[in-house]
Amino acid sequence: MKNIIVTGGAGFIGSNFVHYVVKHHPEVHVTVLDKLTYAGNRENLAGLPTDRVKLVVGDIADAQLVNSLVAEADAVVHYAAESHNDNSLQDPSPFIQTNLVGTFTLLEACRLKGVRFHHVSTDEVYGDLPLREDLPGHGEGPGEKFTDHTPYNPSSPYSASKAGSDLLVRAWVRSFGLQATISNCSNNYGPYQHIEKFIPRQITNILSGERPKLYGDGKNVRDWIHTEDHSAAVWLILTKGTIGETYLIGADGEKDNKTVLELILRLMGKDAQDYDHVNDRPGHDLRYAIDATKLKEELGWQPQFTNFEEGLADTIDWYMNNREWWQAEKAAVEAKYAENGQ
Ligand code: NAD
Ligand code: DAU
């Protein structure tokens, strides 16, 4: 693995992965292929050594470009996607184009050149779980988290497009012998996350003097993982995973949205009740929870960022110290939410 392509490497999780590889694997050269959509930012790669990281601005659905880059690579780590559920409810079309046609284009290039492929996906392909309080025994038993055997049941255009892309990868492995793995991870938090997403939206609302916004009653549960733990897991799967296998990535970080929001307010020195309830997301998934036993037992992965409050405090500091990274976009992001009463 000397030369890898990281698609979407100027986005949130992709750029954190590039930083991780540069720091921990000095022999590796990274080509980032990124279209720099509203979610991509070349600043996310600022300061990285230019002899080891090259940014190519382009579309993963551009077959000519993709074929020429893949011809020079040992592996493709595929993060590029339209990634926000709320956007997919307003206009699904870029989700179909990038997440399905884009993934197909990469798969074809890797098939033709015999290149290793790792597909980065989401736990949302499995749909949602009942809230623990609604389960007999309050959800403490087995089978109440997602595993790689959970049937696919996506809810939104975003998660359906990711589910479709996972199935394309599986078909290319089975029919063409593509050397590929898949990972499905839970909700990430950390630096460089776009301010449309829950945690950075609330932090930057508070920093801008706006009230945070909670969808519905805030009982929906997300299984939070620090993005650095996600990066370590992806590297391990890329280098030691079994071809054709799917690995679920999660760090036992289940929390409801209300709890997370009140913690953010408290950590920022505000009254924990100082927020607005806004319109709920249509089709809003209730709960995600990952069983990462396979990843831990087969590949020896363990999360390192197990103190959520500490990780969240560092994330808050990052947004406080990097106002120029988000401030110019803030008004437009909020105006778009306001159109939907959110
Ligand atoms: P993001 O929206 O922050 O970044 C996506 C990146 O992809 C951006 O840099 C964007 O410019 C680029 N991109 C979009 N369309 C492109 C195209 N057609 N060609 C080339 N580049 C394109 O997303 P993220 O939150 O960092 O998510 C990255 C990946 O991880 C996605 O595949 C997502 O489904 C998956 N994932 C995300 C989470 C999460 O919590 N955010 C959890 C599990 C899996
Ligand atoms: O589970 C993995 C997924 O996590 C990834 O596949 C997606 O790319 C990523 O965006 C994320 O999806 P969610 O929809 O869970 O994340 P989001 O940050 O949009 O919302 C998290 C929760 O917070 C969700 O229950 C909706 C709620 N929410 C969100 C926003 C933006 C609010 O209550 N208020 C808000 O302002």
Image: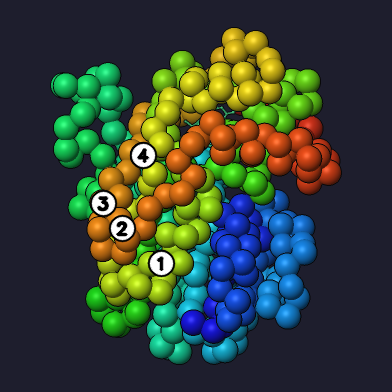
* Sequence-first disc among 3 and 1: 1
Residue corresponding to mark 4: 252
Residue corresponding to mark 2: 295
Disc 3 residue: CB within 8 Å of ligand 1: no
The amino acid beneath tag 1 is Leu
The amino acid beneath tag 4 is Asp
Secondary structure beneath label 3:
helix
- Against 200, residue 109 (above or below) is below
- Against 308, residue 67 (above or below) is below
- Against 69, residue 153 (above or below) is above
**Residue 97 appears in the figure:** no
Task: Determine the CA span between mark 3 and mark 1.
Answer: 15 Å
Task: Determine the CA span between mark 4 and mark 3.
Answer: 11 Å
Q: Are marks 1 and 2 in contact (CB under 8 Å)?
A: yes
Residue 236 - label? 1
* Sequence-first disc among 1 and 4: 1
Residue corresponding to mark 3: 293
Q: Is residue 331 left or right of residue 223?
A: right
- Which colour style is shown? rainbow
Secondary structure beneath label 1:
helix
Image position, residue 52 (x, y; %): 68, 78
Image position, residue 245 (x, y; %): 27, 67
